[in-house]
Image (cartoon, rainbow, N blue to C red):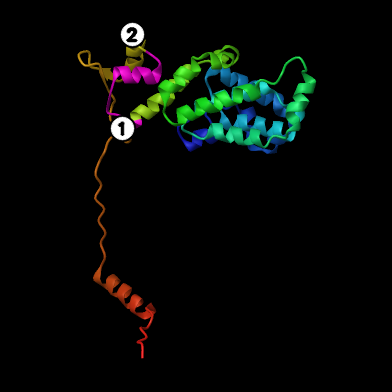
Amino acid sequence: MVTTAANWVAPPTRPPLIETLVSGVDRYNPSNVGILEDYLYHQIRSQEYDCLANLAILKLYQFNPDLYNPDVVINILIKALTSAPFPDFSLCISLLDERPASATSTAAAANPDEPDPLPQLLPVLTQLHGLLQQCRFPRFWALYRSDAVEALRDNYTVECVGFEDAVRDVAVRAVKAAFTSISSERLGSYLDLSGPELTAYVEKLGWTIDAATGVVSVPPNPDNQIESTVVQESIQLPQLTKVIAHAAQTSLPVVSAV
């Protein structure tokens, strides 16, 4: 998962060929769209993630509506979904919003027997993203497991290796930032895990569970440690004198009424 701006701009897993395409003018060459799409599916299979490369695909679709592939777009959005709280999903949506309206009709004409699944799935993806952004993890899992999201699960996220664990990573980042301890029941609702699976996951994180109380201890980190800060300012007398003199010079004269 991307944790720094440097890794977001240039992930260490990005191949040299993709680096050349993303960093130069070739990113706007429509003949390279197949290379970028293949790289996306490599990300789907390997749990790697490269937002800039995926945005380049959406930009090519924007400039070249005939290249539009709804399955590719949906997979890009799925990868961006688990980047929360980072704005990757919104960046992708902004390019879709600007995509020419003719793109959908062009794709439909090319595949009349296969309707575009994006209009149906985009509201679901947007709702899932909103729940992750708001840290409403139990609601996220309830929606994700519901019949309304069956098409997304059966046709797309099932192919995205580690998708559910990537969602759990989002929840873990939020818990680390807000808690020093949390009940195992509450944590389990955030992670959609219980029993031995939850215990194994917590141990994998390096956290501990109190067997008697069921309380999970979250190790200290800069986000969950509240420390008071005392700010002291030292102003020398000569500096203060200059401030007073300047204020006296710039103050407006008082005009008395006659």
Callout 1 secondary element: loop
The residue identified by callout 2 is 196
Callout 2 secondary element: helix
> Residue at the location (37% across, 86% down)?
255
Residue sticking out furthest to the bottom? 258
Q: Which range of residues does the magenta coloring cover?
A: 177-193
Residue 184 on the magenta segment: yes
Query: Label 2 sits on what residue type?
Result: Pro
Examine the rendered structure and indicate whether residue 19 appears above or below residue 45. below
Q: Measuring from the top left, give residue 243's x and y in whole percent.
A: 32, 72
Q: Residue 120 occupies which quadrant of the picture?
A: top right
Q: Residue 90 occupies which quadrant of the picture?
A: top right
The residue identified by callout 1 is 221
Dot 2 or dot 1: first in sequence order is 2
Rounded to the nearest angstrom, the CA distance separating label 2 from label 1 is: 26 Å
Query: Label 1 sits on what residue type?
Result: Asn
